[in-house]
Amino acid sequence: MYRNQLDFAKNRLHLLLEGKIEKEEMTAWSDDLISKLKKLKTGFGVISEILNCQPATEEVRQILVQTQAKAKEIGMGNVVRIVANNNYVTAAQWQRSSRSIGYVALEAHSVAEAEKLLDEADKNNL
């Protein structure tokens, strides 16, 4: 399951991925995400909520990497990823993917913490 929500007031996208994501769903998520990101201003922030997302297959991970690269190309600014302590494999997989294209996401354990971290990062131009 996925959800991509825009927050025009804060120039942010909040994405949610849950469960086992197969190739078809990941492709639909990616297409939806990219079309929405194009509606935001350059420097937009992203909150990626992957608390209950299972590790991806290599084929699905490649779609993730391509999506992250496209988001960066469109003008993505700071990223905060909401992760669970008991879901380290997924968190590590996403961080490894983002590092491969040149950025590191901050990590939080709740939406409130993620919003606060992103506010601070944007304020300090990190």
Image: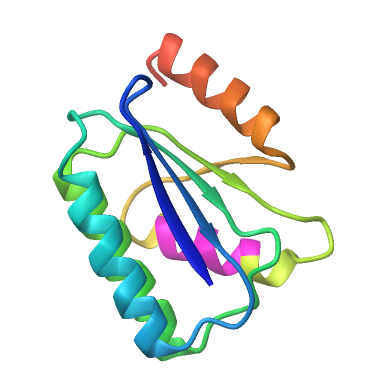
Q: Is residue 20 left or right of residue 7?
A: right
Task: Give above or below for 24 relative to 96.
Answer: below
Place of residue 62 in the rendered image (x, y in percent of width and height, measured from the top left): 35, 79
Query: Would residue 124 be seen by someone viewing this image from the given angle?
Result: no
Query: Would residue 64 be seen by someone viewing this image from the given angle?
Result: yes
Q: Quadrant of residue 17?
A: bottom right
> In this orientation, which residue lies closer to the viewer: 24 or 43?
24
Number of residue marks: 0
> Residue, x 58% and y 27% (percent of image)?
115
> In this orientation, which residue lies closer to the viewer: 47 or 98?
47
Q: Quadrant of the C terminus?
A: top left
Task: Give above or below for 4 relative to 47.
Answer: below
Place of residue 108 in the rendered image (x, y in percent of width and height, measured from the top left): 68, 39
Whether residue 57 is in magenta: the answer is no
Colour mode? rainbow
Q: Quadrant of residue 52?
A: bottom right
Q: Residue furthest right?
A: 86
**Which is the main secondary structure of the residues drawn in magenta?**
helix
Task: Give above or below for 75 relative to 9.
Answer: below
> Residue, x 38% and y 70% (percent of image)?
64
Place of residue 72 in the rendered image (x, y in percent of width and height, measured from the top left): 24, 47
Place of residue 98 in the rendered image (x, y in percent of width and height, measured from the top left): 41, 57
> Residue, x 33% and y 50% (percent of image)?
102
Residue stretch in magenta: 91-98
> Residue, x 72% and y 39% (percent of image)?
110
Whether residue 96 is in magenta: the answer is yes
